[in-house]
Image: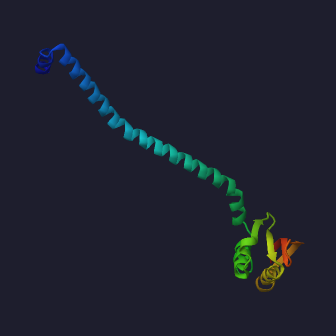
Amino acid sequence: MAALRAWFNGLARREQLAVLGGAAVCLLLLLLAAWLPVERRVARLEQRVQSKRADLAWLQSVAPQLGALRTAPVAAGGESLVALADRVARETGIARSLSSQPGGDGTLSVRLEQVAFDSLLNWTGELVLRHGVRVTSASIDGGPNPGTVSATIVLRAT
């Protein structure tokens, strides 16, 4: 250390300032080289936390629906009424028009929008005749196009 101090003191005043400035720049570069990766990592982790919070908020918003599906009534074949209604809707070609909401009393409320009346009858007939599902109530309204209807049907597994 004494040799370094002697060398530094042997320099002209201008050279001493240049060495001190260079040392300060080197120190600053070393700090930045250490700090930037840490800062980037923190930013990525904060973004990940925000993403996880958004996922949690979504899961909390659909939790009641998922709980209702867990307690959904089961049809004669051991399949839940929700899954059965959806499967038969896909088989009869009306799955895009179907939305369902399990009821707390063992029923399933199904809404069909702008579906062909014949397809609605095929879907309902398949559920009733082949799977033993009972239609508790139905409300059918004519659609803007001939032969299409919108319906709300309440189903119950027997």
Is 17 left or right of 150, judged from the image as shown?
A: left
Q: Quadrant of residue 67?
A: bottom right
Whether residue 82 is visible here, answered yes or no, is: yes
Is 135 left or right of 5, judged from the image as shown?
A: right
Note whether 27 is above or below 132 in the view shown. above
Residue 14 screen position, x and y as percent: 20, 16
Note whether 51 is above or below 101 in the view shown. above
Residue 80 screen position, x and y as percent: 71, 73
Q: Quadrant of the C terminus?
A: bottom right
Residue 145 screen position, x and y as percent: 84, 74
Note whether 36 is above or below 52 in the view shown. above
Note whether 60 is above or below 158 in the view shown. above
Depth order, front residue of 51/66: 51
Q: Quadrant of the N terminus?
A: top left
Depth order, front residue of 125/130: 125
Residue at 79% x, 83% y: name it: 122
